[in-house]
Image: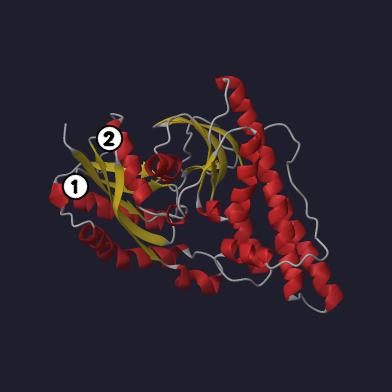
Amino acid sequence: MPETVTVLGIETSCDETAAAVVRRRLDGEAEIISNIVASQMEVHAPYGGVVPEIAARAHVELIDDVILRALADAKCGLQEVDAIAATAGPGLNGGLMVGLTAAKAVASAASKPFYAINHLEGHALTARLTNGLAFPFVLLLVSGGHTQILLVEGVGAYRRMGTTIDDALGEAFDKTAKLLGLAYPGGPAVEAAARSHSMGADITLPTPMVGRPGFDFSFSGLKTAVRQTAQSLADQNDGLSQDAVAAICHGFQRSICRVLTDRVGRALDDVAGTFERQLPLVIAGGVAANQTIRHALETLVADRRSHLIAPPMALCTDNAAMIAWAALERMEAGFTPDGFDFAPKPRWPLDASTAPKIGYGKRGAKA
């Protein structure tokens, strides 16, 4: 058995072009040797969201340099890499094609095995990279495209307990920010505005699904309530003041926290009944960077004598270290490499056995 296992990972599922080198030693210690992320945030900011065609072109322009920088930072040549991995889905088809093509080309040229990784699996396993967390655990995955609760029992063993029946939480943050005239990306902008809210009158917004059976989410009604509240305040005061925007953001985040703690609390209690103990809760995805949400979840798990694990901020948003790590985990679990004919999967649920909640077409289940 080699003393180390080293993987080069590539991530291009949305608007970050990323490459990373991750290594695990024989003693089990894992290390991120390099982690390069080239963000397209400024390119998409004028549009208030990611434009797929622009993102794909930017990936083409950036991908070679990002891979070379990752290898250079790691002081690692391709001959020292044991495998090449890339995000194969879910995500924007154009971006996925760029990353997959680059990874296949590198793997072919260097005669290395290739692994096509589910982006959501990268998020799901990050806590094992950063905290050495053992299976099983409960995962709350909250990002621009996904809002799910999953039971993670092992590599490749995921059971979806709940998902959004309409919009993802990250999308709700972005659209709320755009509606209120805040900057893109919306998550940090809404959080900052909410933090500036004075101790004046609070704005109460709906808490969809709270108290209902099951573990699913819904955010479309909350977005509608934000729009209606903003319009009403603007009509009454000849426009929205900064104080009004801050109050709406504060109310929005408070509703989100109530929804998340209700849904996740139910899921934790359900799983505890099966395992006869409380499992750790992991939060992953871009929305995991929100400190207000983290604090609410920390309180939730503390009441159940469990604990919350959240990745470092740099690993909350899309990155290639989690893709390399997922491939490394699959290698060590005995999964065979993927073929060079592996096609992008813009829709690729992590729990493929669960019936889709939202639509099903030629590209697969949406969620």
Q: Can you see residue 342?
A: no
Question: Residue 331: which disc?
Answer: 2
Q: In the image, is 129 to the left or to the right of 179?
A: left
Toward the right, the furthest residue is 236
Q: How is the image coloured?
A: secondary structure
Does 66 sit above or below residue 162? below
Residue in front for this viewpoint, 230 or 268: 268
| Number of on-image labels | 2
**Amino acid under disc 2:** Met
Q: In the image, is 306 to the left or to the right of 336?
A: right
**Amino acid under disc 1:** Val
Q: In the image, is 78 to the left or to the right of 299?
A: left
Question: Residue 257: which disc?
Answer: none
What is the distance, in whole Å, between disc 1 and disc 2 at their CAs? Answer: 13 Å
Residue 282, percent from left and from top: 52, 40
Residue 183, percent from left and from top: 58, 71
Instruction: Mark 2: give few (<14), some (14-19) or many (20+) Cα within 10 Å.
Output: some
Residue 7, percent from left and from top: 25, 46
Residue 291, percent from left and from top: 59, 55
Rendered-image quadrant of the N terminus: top left
- Name the residue that disc number 1 marks: 81
SS label for mark 2 = helix
Q: In the image, is 130 to the left or to the right of 240?
A: left
Rendered-image quadrant of the C terminus: top right
